[in-house]
Amino acid sequence: MGRAAPNDHRRPGTAARPSGRNEAATMAKEAKTNAMRMLERMKISYTPHEYDHDDGAIDGVSVATKLGQDPARVFKTLVTQGASRSYFVFVIPVAAELDLKKAAKSVGEKSVAMIHVADINKVTGYIRGGCSPVGMKKQFVTVLDESILAQPTVMVSGGRIGTQVELAPADLIKAARATTAAITMA
């Protein structure tokens, strides 16, 4: 009587107390990604959006469709490596294709090439389908397609498959420390 179980590290005579944490708040905190934490640290307003990815369709156009959004408002993050061996990040509408020549010119490189999917995590800290222009392991030169400026809000990956964040273009430019240029195929 009054003795604690061998694996119970509480002081004898004390009972387990509820943590007092709101379970929903705890789950919300666990659901935050590095990108979301960075936006909050910068005091940038955003709206998180979740989508079902159990069907494996995580390409940008599928994500836009699942969220009921115009693909012109949903942007994908592409990571390249320049002739100088430096990495560059380009953010373009999901239905568009990156023009590698325009992209290279926008960052002052002779050429850029897409990195291999297998290298995305090593370079950015994110995985394919969950790569956000905000909150990468390192800050890379980032260029957003100039079409972003015509949108009232845009969506980019929230840093995890199944999560997008919606924010104002000016806020994304600030958070990603980005510039804008015409970088997509005509």
Image (cartoon, rainbow, N blue to C red):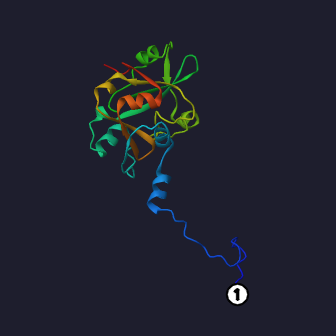
Q: Residue at x 49, y 43 (%)?
A: 37
In the displayed structure, 106 sits above or below 91; it is: above
Residue 166 % position (x, y): 36, 39
Q: Quadrant of the N terminus?
A: bottom right
Classify 10 Å Cα crowding around label 1: few (below 14), some (14-19), many (20 and above): few
In the rendered image, which residue does mark 1 sit on? 1
Residue that extends furthest to the bottom in the rendered view of this protein = 1
Three-letter code for the amino acid on which mark 1 is drawn = Met
Q: Quadrant of the C terminus?
A: top left
Can the viewer see residue 82? yes
Q: Quadrant of residue 69?
A: top left
Residue 75 % position (x, y): 37, 33
Residue 56 % position (x, y): 40, 48
Can the viewer see residue 92? no
Q: Residue at x 36, y 36 (%)?
A: 167
Q: Residue at x 62, y 76 (%)?
A: 15
Image check: 115 left or right of 101?
right
